[in-house]
Image (cartoon, grey):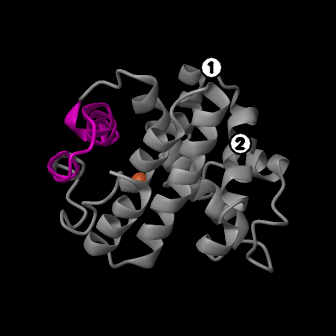
């Protein structure tokens, strides 16, 4: 499956534009991580792009979220390593994170929310003016974007990345697609 097919599948299954943007942001961070770590950028990027494809089909039911998504993308012919990352990113199923790809998706997913919120509290609501150090400050404010699980973001250590490094990488990656994100 190429990127265009993946995005078509996302659009066919997800109407909420914010959910689509979250998946695009996750893709951007996954691509940046793959480049940093010398991994397969298309594989990692498309995994990020597809990871919440079942969000509306499961209607927020965490007991089926990511299981249905994994079945869906498997039927589309997506490689099993990518299917496993999508399946395991929802830890409600207790499926262990086994690969770097699994770990990358797991920590990139909540970082998009933290960075988006850091942009939205600015008067101009733009990513351009968000600095890496302000993302770090927001990270430490537990009540800020509380849904962005800090422990999950900190799992970047499993990829050998320092937290500061990961926050900056995520910020730069999302800035690179700021227009698409409307930020
Ligand atoms: Fe997600």
Task: Indicate the quadrant containing the C terminus: top left, top right, bottom left or bottom right.
Answer: bottom right
Measured along the vertical axis of the image, is residue 54 above or below residue 83? below
What is the quadrant of residue 56 in the picture?
bottom left
Residue in the image at 54% along x and 28% along y: 39
120 w.r.t. 176: above or below: below
Which percent across, then down, holds residue 151?
A: 52, 34
Q: Is residue 138 visible?
A: no
> Gap in Å between the C-alphas at discs 2 and 1?
13 Å
Please say whether residue 87 is one of the residues in the magenta stretch: yes
Quarter of the view holding residue 162: top right
Asked if residue 73 can be seen in this view, the reply is: yes
Question: Where residue 98 sits in the image (x, y, percent)?
Answer: 35, 21
Q: Dot 1: few (<14), some (14–19), or many (≥20) neighbours within 10 Å?
A: few
Q: Is residue 62 left or right of residue 42?
A: left
Q: Tell me, yes or no, whether the two marked residues, 2 and 1, touch with CB atoms within 8 Å.
A: no
How far from the left and from the top, in percent, is residue 50? 36, 54
Which residues are drawn in magenta?
71-94
Q: Is residue 176 above or below residue 168?
A: below
Q: Residue at point 43% right, 69% down?
A: 20
Q: Earlier in the sequence, mark 2 or mark 1?
A: 1
Question: Badge 2: how crowded within 10 Å, few (<14), some, or many (20+)?
Answer: many
**Residue 132, image x, y percentages:** 81, 48
Q: Is residue 116 magenta?
A: no
- The residue at 75%/66% (across/down) is 127
Relative to 140, 90 lies left or right: left
According to the image, label 2 marks what residue?
169
Give the main secondary structure of the magenta stretch: helix
Instruction: Identify the residue position indicated by label 1 in the image.
Output: 160
Residue found at x 21% / y 46%: 77
**Between 179 and 148, which is closer to the camera in this rendering?**
179
């Amino acid at each position: 499956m190429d990127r265009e097919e993946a995005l078509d599948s996302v659009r066919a299954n997800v109407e909420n534009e914010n959910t689509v943007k979250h998946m695009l942001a996750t893709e951007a961070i996954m691509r940046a991580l793959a480049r940093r770590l010398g991994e397969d950028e298309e594989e990692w990027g498309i995994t990020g792009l597809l990871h919440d494809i079942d969000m509306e089909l499961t209607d927020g039911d965490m007991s089926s979220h990511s299981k249905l998504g994994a079945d869906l993308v498997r039927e589309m012919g997506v490689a099993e390593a990518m299917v496993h990352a999508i399946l395991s990113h929802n830890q409600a199923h207790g499926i262990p994170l086994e690969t770097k790809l699994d770990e990358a998706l797991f920590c990139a997913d909540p970082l998009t929310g933290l960075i988006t919120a850091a942009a939205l509290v600015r008067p101009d609501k733009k990513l351009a003016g968000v600095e890496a150090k302000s993302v770090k400050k927001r990270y430490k404010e537990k009540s800020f974007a509380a849904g962005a699980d800090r422990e999950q973001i900190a799992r970047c250590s499993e990829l050998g990345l320092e937290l500061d490094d990961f926050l900056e990488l995520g910020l730069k990656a999302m800035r690179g697609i700021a227009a698409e994100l409307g930020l």
